[in-house]
């Protein structure tokens, strides 16, 4: 900073005397000397503080690694060629790992793997026998008048809960757009609608519109977004650029877990970094604890949470019908499902094991089970397809899920890049050489005492965005077509006559115009609307 001004305003436009010039020169020298001394002292203090922090962290991490049999990962800390800052970051990353729990996580996952490997399909124990889901369920596809009345009442219950601030929406947004050919968070992907809306914007604006549909018209719905370490900064920056879309948004990253050998030894990827991977979408639960999300929800008065993925262009965040139905059924956990249309559709389904709800992968079901149909309505018995769209009570998460977090990991054998001391470089193996622990969001379902299911119409609520443009299924093209079909349906139901290109995939009803088809009469009733359109 510049030295303080010596001359008073009175001298501003007059020649300065030699005396004044000498005073300024002397003052400038003294100020500069003092400033340098302060900077030097601050640098020394900062250096000592950083050194003290490093030494304390090193001592703590060393002690923990020694106690848990992981001292080998510290072997390169004496290497002078590794910058101290890199070593510090390395130690901090180790410090965040639950080293003391990894052994129990691994042993439990290995025991599960061995059990599945040795199980005789012809002699399955009763607790592992797959049976149809035993909980309550309802369907928005039903033509039954009683069901329609039930769901209408559920919708109002959901709106009332939203209006009273008891409902939060939680978006799973840790995925990247890699499979779409997009370098960035999947939520920032534009599927090609006329408005150019991204997946993030579609979801955020639907949530904003839903808040406006409450009786007060200003229902602020707490919105939580779980990112990943890979896309956290990009995601939060995107929302900041759009002023969080006028929402109350809280961001938190899911965690990672280190890769291990079969005997539980951590694997170094470089001399100063571990091989790590995201802990699966089941990482939502420990992440909510680590980042105080559950306590934040509780402080805000939230009692019910709707959790859903980012890769569905038609998802209804905080869906009042689904939330209200779960509340009415006194469910602690709920699952929104799509009923399978054919036995060979490759999707996990909701079922029961040992009288407990669970998700069974299609590969774990026999042909006979997959094809079994109900005598009443002809639908597949094992047909409740899982689309990662869930309801929880806060009490269930706090009191039941959190105490059981350590029992939910599975083995994924992978090719783990590792640092080779002999070659002095990172090696990419050609065969599986390590283990990654992962968990799934539905691993908590067996803990539920009162789970319920709402089966919804596929064409109204499911437009997945998973595969690159041009793919036959689950691509931006198919999602855009499904989105456009919903827009045309809503306009027809509101009284419009559609003209023009009726097959267009460029028809759009913006989320701020309508959340679920409501309120379109002024734009549509008795009017001719040319396709494509954007309202």
Image (cartoon, rainbow, N blue to C red):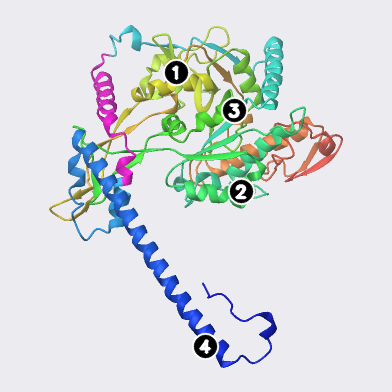
| Main secondary structure type of the part rendered in magenta | helix
Q: Position of residue 265 (x, y in %)?
A: 20, 37
The residue under label 4 is: 22
Q: Nearer the viewer, residue 236 or 140?
A: 236
For the residue pair 252 and 529, the one nearer the viewer reads as 252
Picture layout, residue 166 above or below residue 78 = above
- Judging from the image, what secondary structure is the residue with disc 3 in? helix
Residue 110 is one of the magenta-drawn residues? yes
Could you say which disc has been placed on residue 305 in the image? Answer: none
Q: Nearer the viewer, mark 1 or mark 4?
A: 4
Few, some or many C-alpha atoms within 10 Å of disc 4 (few <14, some 14-19, many ≥20)? few
* Membership of 361 in magenta stretch: no
Q: Residue at x 55, y 88 (%)?
A: 21
Q: Secondary structure at mark 4?
A: helix
- Image point 40% across, 24% down: which residue? 361
Q: Are marks 1 and 3 in contact (CB under 8 Å)?
A: no
Q: Earlier in the sequence, mark 3 or mark 2?
A: 2
Q: Position of residue 207 (x, y in %)?
A: 65, 35
Q: Residues within 10 Å of mark 3 (few under 14, many from 20)?
A: some
The residues tagged by marks 1 and 3 sit, at their Cα atoms, a distance apart of 32 Å
**What residue would you read off at disc 3?**
458
Q: Which residues are magenta?
A: 92-120
Q: Is residue 374 left or right of residue 141?
A: left
**Residue under label 1:** 400
Mark toward the start of the polypeptide (1 vs 2): 2
């Amino acid at each position: 900073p510049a030295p303080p001004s010596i001359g008073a305003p009175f001298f501003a436009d007059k020649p300065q005397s030699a005396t004044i010039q000498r005073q300024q020169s002397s003052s400038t020298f003294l100020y500069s000397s003092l400033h340098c001394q302060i900077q030097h002292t601050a640098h020394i203090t900062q250096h000592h503080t950083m050194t003290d922090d490093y030494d304390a962290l090193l001592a703590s991490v060393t002690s923990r690694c020694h106690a848990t049999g992981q001292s080998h990962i510290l072997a390169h800390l004496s290497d002078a060629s590794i910058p101290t800052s890199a070593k510090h970051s390395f130690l901090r990353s180790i410090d965040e790992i639950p080293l003391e729990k990894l052994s129990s996580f691994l042993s439990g996952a290995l025991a599960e793997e061995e059990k599945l490997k040795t199980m005789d399909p012809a002699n399955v124990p009763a607790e592992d026998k797959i049976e149809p889901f035993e909980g309550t369920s309802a369907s928005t596809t039903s033509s039954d008048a009683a069901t329609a009345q039930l769901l209408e009442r559920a919708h109002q219950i959901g709106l009332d809960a939203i209006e009273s601030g008891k409902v939060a929406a939680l978006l799973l947004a840790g995925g990247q757009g890699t499979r779409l050919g997009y370098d960035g968070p999947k939520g920032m992907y534009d599927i090609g609608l006329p408005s150019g809306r991204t997946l993030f914007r579609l979801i955020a604006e639907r949530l904003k519109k839903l808040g406006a549909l409450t009786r007060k018209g200003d229902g602020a719905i707490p919105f939580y977004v779980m990112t990943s370490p890979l896309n956290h900064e990009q995601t939060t920056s995107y929302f900041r650029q759009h002023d969080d879309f006028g929402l109350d948004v809280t961001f938190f990253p899911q965690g990672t877990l280190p890769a291990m050998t079969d005997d539980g030894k951590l694997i170094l990827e470089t001399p100063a970094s571990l091989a790590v991977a995201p802990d699966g979408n089941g990482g939502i639960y420990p992440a909510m604890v680590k980042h105080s999300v559950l306590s934040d929800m509780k402080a805000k008065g939230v009692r019910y949470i709707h959790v859903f993925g980012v890769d569905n262009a038609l998802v209804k965040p905080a869906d009042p019908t689904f939330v209200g139905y779960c509340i009415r059924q006194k469910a602690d956990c709920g699952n929104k499902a799509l009923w399978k249309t054919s036995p060979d559709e490759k999707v996990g389904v909701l079922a029961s094991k040992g009288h407990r709800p669970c998700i069974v992968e299609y590969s774990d079901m026999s042909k006979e089970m997959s094809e079994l149909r109900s005598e009443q309505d002809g639908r597949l018995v094992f047909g409740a397809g899982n689309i990662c769209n869930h309801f929880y009570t806060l009490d269930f998460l706090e009191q039941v899920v959190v105490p059981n977090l350590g029992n939910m990991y599975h083995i994924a054998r992978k090719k783990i890049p590792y640092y080779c001391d002999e070659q002095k470089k990172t090696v990419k193996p050609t065969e599986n050489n390590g283990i990654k622990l992962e968990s799934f969001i539905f691993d908590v379902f067996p803990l539920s005492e009162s789970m319920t299911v709402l089966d919804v119409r596929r064409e109204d609520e499911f437009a997945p965005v998973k595969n690159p443009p041009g793919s036959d299924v689950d691509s931006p093209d198919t999602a855009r077509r499904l989105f456009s079909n919903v827009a045309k349906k809503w306009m027809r139901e509101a009284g419009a006559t559609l003209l023009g290109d009726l097959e267009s995939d460029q028809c759009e009803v913006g989320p701020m115009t309508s959340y679920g088809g409501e309120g379109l009469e002024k734009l549509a009733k008795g009017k001719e609307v040319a396709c494509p359109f954007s309202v």
